[in-house]
Image (cartoon, coloured by chain):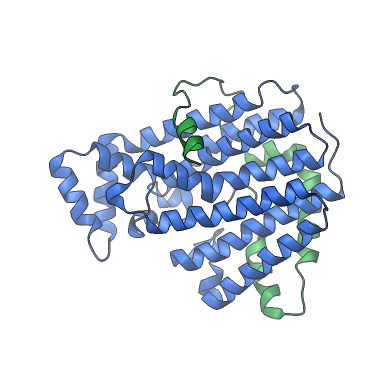
Chain colours: A blue, B green
Amino acid sequence: MFDGVDERVMQAAQVIEYLHTATLLHDDVVDGAETRRAKQAVCRVWGNEASVLSGDYLLSMAFHRLTKLRNLEVLELMSETTTKMARGELLQLTRSFETANEEEYLEIIINKTACLFATAIKTGALLAGASGESANKLYDYGMALGISFQIVDDALDYADEKKTGKPVGGDLQERKITLPLSHLLGQANASDRKRLDSILSMEEIAKPQIEEVIELMQHYGSISYTLEFSRKHAAAAKLSIANFPETRLTKSLSDIADFVVSRQL
Amino acid sequence: MPDLVSALMNVPLTKTVAPTSSTSTSLEHILKVVSTDIELLELKILSDVKTDIPLLNNVADHILVLEEKGCAPHLYC
């Protein structure tokens, strides 16, 4: 469909990986995370300073490598994306449960996650000689895929620990606005809402309260609602590339969209 | 950004494109089509991040390399 993977595409892929890893190193400090990629988080092994500074190094390295591509469109796209990612994290940090709604949640995940998916695939397409129209369709695919991925990730936070390898209810403990909780708060009756407000105002949310919230989510169908929301964005991702010629690569893109909504559930 | 958010909020709830594969398809199987490129990318990353600062090398080895999975964990965050 486009030209193949050459040295420039490979360099761009390295840049994306450096950017992504830099954000993980920073996020783990912000979140006080214990684990990352099934290992102890870097901030737990070497401390917050090492995690932040290593993230800074990878971020700087990413932009240094990017300048070597001599492609202003790609440079602009990546610069805009890193700004959006920082914006997403700031929005998540500053928005409270009282005002949380689906629109705000979507804005957060578009900024903090989905735009990197979209930029990664558009960059690869542009460097491989895709037309502007095709690159934009792939950007739309990446955006919808990223949204779908993050929504499932947020649902998995309330799933069985054995399936995810991560402690259940981490987002709840950090008071993060995610779709399952936002749906629950919107659907709960007065009595349940009062109980939820009481849990959310606790200094520390312990395991029994997490289990209580998960039970309420099951009762109000919040996880099912969340997964349906994810599925519609996975379908939108596939629709974005529906007019592309059918090849092994486009089938792989379609399969990834299916995988994202089915993983570990 | 609010315009984009509004547009995305209005994505139809109906599934417009049916799944084309079994949901049990593994990620390894899906990525097989680009596995050679991914292996090359992993090698490039590992050599590129080596510095004269041992702490940075340790951090890079720790977060970029997954035991038995190679580095760059792709769809794993």
Q: Is residue A33 visible?
A: no
Describe residue A177's horizontal placement relative to residue A90 as left or right: left
Number of numbered tags placed on the structure image: 0
Please tell me in which quadrant of the rendered image residue A127 appears: top right
Please tell me in which quadrant of the rendered image residue A24 appears: bottom right
Residue A109, position as x, y percentages in the image: 49, 46
Describe residue B77's horizontal placement relative to residue B50 as left or right: left
Q: Quadrant of the N terminus of chain A?
A: top right
Q: What residue is rendered at 62% in x and 60% in y?
A: A21
Q: What residue is rendered at 15% in x and 48% in y?
A: A194
Q: What residue is rendered at 69% in x and 32% in y?
A: A252
Pick the front one: A219 or A163: A219
Residue B69, position as x, y percentages in the image: 67, 54
Q: What residue is rendered at 74% in x and 48% in y?
A: A74
Pick the front one: A265 or A261: A261
Q: Is residue A197 above or below residue A122?
A: below
Q: Is residue A238 above or below residue A174?
A: above
Q: Is residue A22 visible?
A: yes
Q: Is residue B44 above or below residue A106?
A: below
Pick the front one: A99 or A238: A99
Residue A121, position as x, y percentages in the image: 69, 41
Judged from this view, the residue extending furthest toward the left is: A191
Describe residue A38's horizontal placement relative to residue A125 as left or right: left
Please tell me in which quadrant of the rendered image residue A203 appears: bottom left
Residue A114, position as x, y percentages in the image: 56, 44
Q: Is residue A201 above or below residue A47?
A: above
